[in-house]
Image (tube, helix red, strand yellow):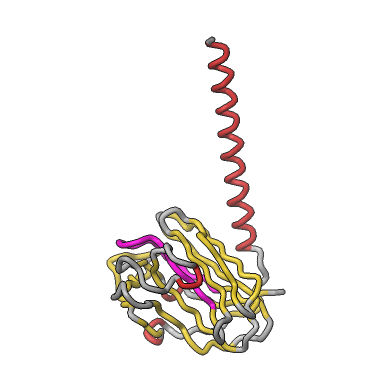
Amino acid sequence: MKKIVLALFTIALFACKNESKENIKTKSLEQTKVNDIEVLDSVLLPNYPLWLLNRVELKEADVKYNSQQVFKLERVTTEETAYSSVNNLPVTYGSNYRVSIITKKATIGNSLGLRIVGAYPNRVDAVFDLKNGIKKDVIDVGGFLNGIASIEDLGEGWFKCYLEGEINADKIKIILGPTTGLGKTEAWEAATNEKCNVYILPGSLTLEELAN
């Protein structure tokens, strides 16, 4: 009987080790994918005071990230859409673009919604779980194609969230905001059941043109 128990324990231990190695391998592959993409150009973005705030507040938080001031982005309503946006960004039609931002779970909720949008209905959306450090979902709609999202663990609860796609437009908006992540990904900015929030580093928001 002892031999049987020992054998079962050994098998279980071996399986756990293999699973751990597989998880490390998967994370490593995703990390390589994030870092090895060739960037052709970066689009100059306006500073956060020029962002449009639609039923959200963006205020300094009592938090720092590498000595940089962190802001809390928080919904002020649960009944209507709420998000921040950076508008009228010129891009090259048919090129691949990637948006990224450094963020962290704040005090209410644990999800961040991110969108690249052109003329309706063309867009790419993603929702990120900032508690568990995972991409929850990504979709592309209309003439925006090949939507990809990924998340990079920066340590101490901080993450860098990435969203990219083929952008068939010559002008876009970047939209982001806290969400519960309970509804459809393409409507993450819609009404929620709580005034959720996230920490963000506004200066980390980037828009990059990628090699095809």
Position of residue 168 measured from the top left corner of the image (x, y, whole percent)? 65, 83
Residue 147: which quarter of the image? bottom right
Which part of the image, by quadrant, shows the N terminus? top right
Instruction: State the predominant SS element of the stretch in magenta.
Output: strand
Q: Give the range drawn in magenta.
A: 99-116
Residue 99: which quarter of the image? bottom right
Position of residue 205 measured from the top left corner of the image (x, y, whole percent)? 48, 75
Q: How many labels does the image show?
A: 0
Position of residue 3 measured from the top left corner of the image (x, y, whole percent)? 57, 12
Which part of the image, by quadrant, shows the C terminus? bottom right
Residue 108: which quarter of the image? bottom left
From the viewer's perspective, is 175 left or right of 108? right
Residue at the spot x=27%, y=66% of the render? 62
- Compared to residue 112, the image places residue 89 above or below, namely below
Residue at the spot x=49%, y=68% of the render? 185
Residue at the spot x=61%, y=76% of the render? 97
Position of residue 33 measured from the top left corner of the image (x, y, whole percent)? 64, 61
Residue at the spot x=29%, y=75% of the render? 77
